[in-house]
Amino acid sequence: MALQQTRIFVANEVLFTEGEQGECAYLIERGSVQIFIKKDDGEIPLRVLGEGEIVGEMSLIENNLRSACCRAMTDGQAIIITKEQLLDRINVIDPIIKLILKAMLERLRTQNDILRNKKIPAHKPTPSIAITKEKKIALDRITLEHKIACGLEDDEFLPYYQPIYDLSKEAIVGCEALMRWHSKEQGVVSPAVFMDAMDSSPMIIRAGKMMIEKSLTDLKQLAQHVGRPESFFVSINVSGRQFGYVDFLNQLEDARNRIGVPSAQIKLELTESIMTGGPQALKVLNDCRNLGYKLAVDDFGTGFSSLQYLARMPLTDLKVDRSFIKLMREDQKSLHVVQCLIYMAKLLGLTLTAEGIETAEQLNHLKLLGIELGQGFLFAKPLPLAEFLKLNSKLIRKAA
Ligand code: C2E
Ligand code: CA
Ligand code: CA
């Protein structure tokens, strides 16, 4: 990476002029600058900026020409922020925040034009293609969030259940609750469409609570149907935001006691990011475990976290990500990763579940390797409660 550059300036030096293409912004370390706009009959001062303030960022964010000039009021020095540095950050922010930011900058630019007595066209100037695309992404996101909120209000979200098999017996021993949206407009919508938007807003707390309530309520019927009233478990996905919510465990316990389900029949599927959540996360994990819940790391091996947490966190289960299961038969290295996981899980006393089993070959291979549990389209897709309750005994106990 290029070394951070500094710009030394002297009083009255012009740092940039309106109409120029902006190539960098400045973080003022020492001294002060004035922002002004030119008018036919002189200059209009807009503001004075000093130590610790940023100047010249506007045209970079907007990808537009400088809308004002900047002149040093005193001698001084500024750190140069390159276009690349700034855009790298802007590109990863939430599209809605990006839209708001751009709208604010557009308004500021319009104000400068008004001060300059420029005629503002009745219609907005045609935005560049890039801005139109960005706006569309942001507007789509706002619309989606609105629809999700309405869907939650109208109780359109519900769990589907995918059976989890004991691979050696080929019998259903539990299930994973997976959220679906029965949208009036679009029919059954999968999490691929809505989970990102839901998970980046507080709506996930409400939706997560609904998943807990509904899946615990359905647990008795599911367990009875497969003939394992006391050992059948439901796996519930818990997002990082939901897990970090102060009332998470109280709400879970409240639902469990009210509905009357033993904690041993509930497995919480957590992402690797939760494991790196520090002492607070560890405390909630310990509380959950002490209360008897099973704790699984979901999509194990796909995150960026260290393996340290495996030794420190009170885990009971690991779920091996579908990508390993898919590649394992063609790619030696993926197979070796799975073999290592099996060895490690055995030593650590963790139950392994293979996700995404799609073929009989994969199943036979996983059985040979000694993986305990598995789920996948080979057995069944996630099903609504009523469909799950129609699973025949052959599917419930495949080997029979
Ligand atoms: P996940 O937790 O890894 O769930 C497993 C996903 O794999 C599910 O996708 C399931 O339908 C799919 N799957 C199962 N077997 C197979 C197979 O054999 N082949 C293939 N190709 N896919 C298979 P789904 O239901 O679309 O859910 C996607 C993700 O959305 C979940 O991944 C989970 O991260 C998230 N999600 C779903 N429900 C909830 C929820 O209630 N709360 C939270 N926080 N996240 C959820
Ligand atoms: Ca999961
Ligand atoms: Ca998973």
Image (tube, helix red, strand yellow):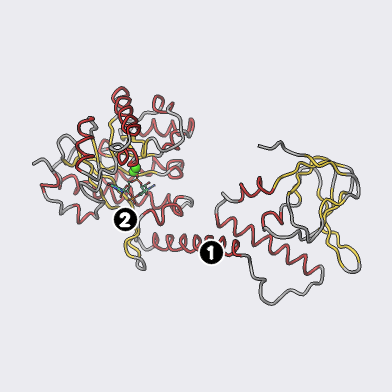
Residue at figure coordinates x 63%, y 65% from the top left = 128
Q: Estimate the x, y position of residue 271 in percent, counting from the top left.
A: 40, 39
Determine which residue is flagged by label 2. 158
Q: Which mark is residue 136?
A: 1
Q: Choose between 260 and 1: the one closer to the eye.
A: 1
The disc, 2 or 1, on the residue closer to the chain's N-terminal end is: 1
Hey, which quadrant is residue 270 in on the image? top left
- Farthest top residue? 347
Q: CA distance from mark 2 to mark 1?
A: 29 Å
Report whether 342 appears left or right of 41. Answer: left
**Does residue 290 show up?**
no
Q: Estimate the x, y position of residue 267 in percent, counting from the top left.
A: 30, 38
In the rendered image, which quarter contains the N terminus?
Answer: top right
Q: Nearer the viewer, mark 2 or mark 1?
A: 1
Q: Estimate the x, y position of residue 20 in percent, counting from the top left.
A: 78, 58
Kind of residue sitting beneath label 2: Leu
